[in-house]
Image: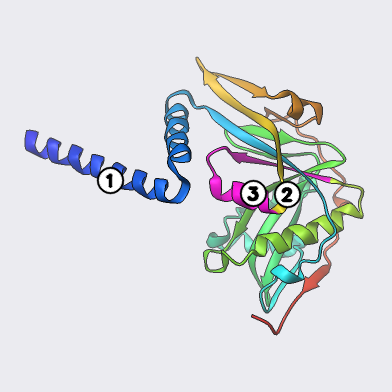
C-alpha cells in the first residue's frame, strides 16, 4: 500500500514537472509561474481576474485573412438554431435563444453551408460565468464566445470575422470593442495584441465566506464596463439583426 502510494506520488510529480517544462518552453518562466499561482488561488479562493481590453473598431478588409472558399457574414437566427445541434460548435439551444432574445449578434465564417467559426457581440450585457454577467454601453460593444473548429484553427479566421463585424458595427454607431479574458490565457492575449486590443485594466471577483466580491480598476469603471449579478441585464431591440453576406474569397490557398 505504501509503495503504491509512493509510486502514485512520484508519477504525479513527474507529470507536473513535464507540464512545467512544456509551459516554460512555450511561455517562459515568469508566465509559467503565474499560471500556477493563479490556478492555486482559483482553486482555494475561487478568484477570477480578467484582463479588460478595448480596441477601436476599424475599417479593414478581411480579404488577406480569408482562406480559399471561406465566406464571412452575420449568422441569421435560423442558422444559429441549426448550429446548436452540432456538439462541436459549443452552441447550446438555450444559449442561442437567450442571446437572440437580448439582441446579440453572431458573426460567422462558412465553408459552403458549414459554420466553421463564430464570435458573438452584445450591446448591453452577456453571461460570463458563475451567475455573473458582463455589461457594456454605447459606443462600446462586448465581444464574447469566440470559437473556431479545431481543424480550421491557425488560419486567422477569427481575424477575418472581427474585421467584418467591425465594418458592420461602425455603420451602426459603435466605435469600440470591449473584451474580457483570463490573465493567464496567453494564446488569446496574443491574438488580442495582434488585433490592437489594448489592456486598460482589470476586473474580477472572489468568493469570501460564500459571498461574491466584485472588483474593477478605475479605468474600467470610467467606461462603464462591469461584472454584475444575474438578473440585471438589459435588452436591445432585436430588429438590429440583419443577416447579409459581407465578405467572400475563393480560388486561393
- Circle 3: element type: helix
Which residue is depicted at the point 45% across and 44% down?
Answer: 28
Position in image of residue 167 (x %, y %) = 85, 58
Q: Is residue 241 visible?
A: no
Percent position of residue 11, x then y: 20, 44
Label 1 element class: helix
Q: Which residue is mark 3?
A: 94
Residue matched to label 1: 15
Q: Of label 1 and label 3, which has the lower sequence position?
A: 1
Q: Give the distance between the C-alpha atoms of the residues marked 1 and 2, in whole angstroms.
A: 37 Å
Nearest the eye: 83 or 196: 196
| Residue 145: mark in rendering | none
In 3D space, how far apart are the residues under numbered discs 3 and 2 (Cα atoms)?
A: 33 Å
Q: Mark 3 against mark 2, which lies toward the viewer? A: 2
Extreme-bottom residue of the structure: 251
Span of residues in magenta: 176-194
Left or right, residue 143 beside residue 213: right
Kindly report which numbered mark, 1 or 3, lies closer to the viewer in this rendering: 1
Residue at disc 2, secondary structure = loop
- Circle nearer the N terminus (3, 2): 3
Does 107 lie within the magenta span?
A: no
Q: CA distance from mark 1 to mark 3?
A: 38 Å
Name the residue: 77% across, 62% down. 76
Q: Depth check: 224 or 62 in front?
A: 62
Q: Tag 2: Cα neighbours inside 10 Å, few (<14), some, or many (≥20)?
A: some
- Give residue 160's quadrant in the image: bottom right
| Residue ID for mark 2 | 196
Amino acid at each position: 500500500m505504501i509503495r503504491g502510494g509512493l509510486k502514485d506520488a512520484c508519477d504525479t510529480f513527474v507529470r507536473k514537472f513535464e507540464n512545467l517544462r512544456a509551459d516554460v518552453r512555450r511561455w517562459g518562466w515568469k508566465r509559467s509561474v503565474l499560471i500556477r499561482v493563479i490556478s492555486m488561488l482559483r482553486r482555494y479562493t475561487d478568484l477570477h481576474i480578467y484582463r479588460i481590453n478595448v480596441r477601436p473598431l476599424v475599417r479593414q478588409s478581411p480579404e488577406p485573412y480569408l482562406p480559399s472558399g471561406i465566406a464571412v457574414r452575420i449568422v441569421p437566427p435560423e442558422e444559429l438554431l441549426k448550429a446548436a445541434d452540432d456538439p462541436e460548435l459549443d452552441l447550446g439551444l438555450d444559449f442561442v435563444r437567450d442571446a437572440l432574445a437580448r439582441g446579440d449578434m453572431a458573426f460567422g465564417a462558412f465553408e459552403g453551408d458549414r459554420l466553421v467559426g463564430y464570435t458573438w457581440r452584445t450591446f448591453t450585457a452577456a453571461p460570463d460565468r458563475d451567475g455573473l454577467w458582463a455589461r457594456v454601453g454605447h459606443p462600446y460593444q462586448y465581444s464574447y464566445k469566440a470559437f473556431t473548429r479545431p481543424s480550421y484553427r491557425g488560419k486567422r479566421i477569427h481575424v477575418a470575422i472581427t474585421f467584418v463585424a467591425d465594418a458592420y458595427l461602425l455603420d451602426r454607431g459603435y466605435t469600440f470593442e470591449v473584451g474580457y479574458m483570463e490573465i493567464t490565457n496567453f494564446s488569446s492575449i496574443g491574438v488580442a495584441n495582434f488585433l490592437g486590443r489594448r489592456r486598460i485594466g482589470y476586473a474580477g471577483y472572489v468568493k469570501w465566506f460564500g459571498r461574491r466580491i466584485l472588483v474593477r480598476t478605475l479605468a474600467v469603471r470610467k467606461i462603464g464596463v462591469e461584472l454584475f449579478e444575474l438578473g440585471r441585464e438589459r435588452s436591445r431591440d432585436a430588429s438590429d439583426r440583419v443577416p447579409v453576406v459581407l465578405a467572400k474569397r475563393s480560388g486561393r490557398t
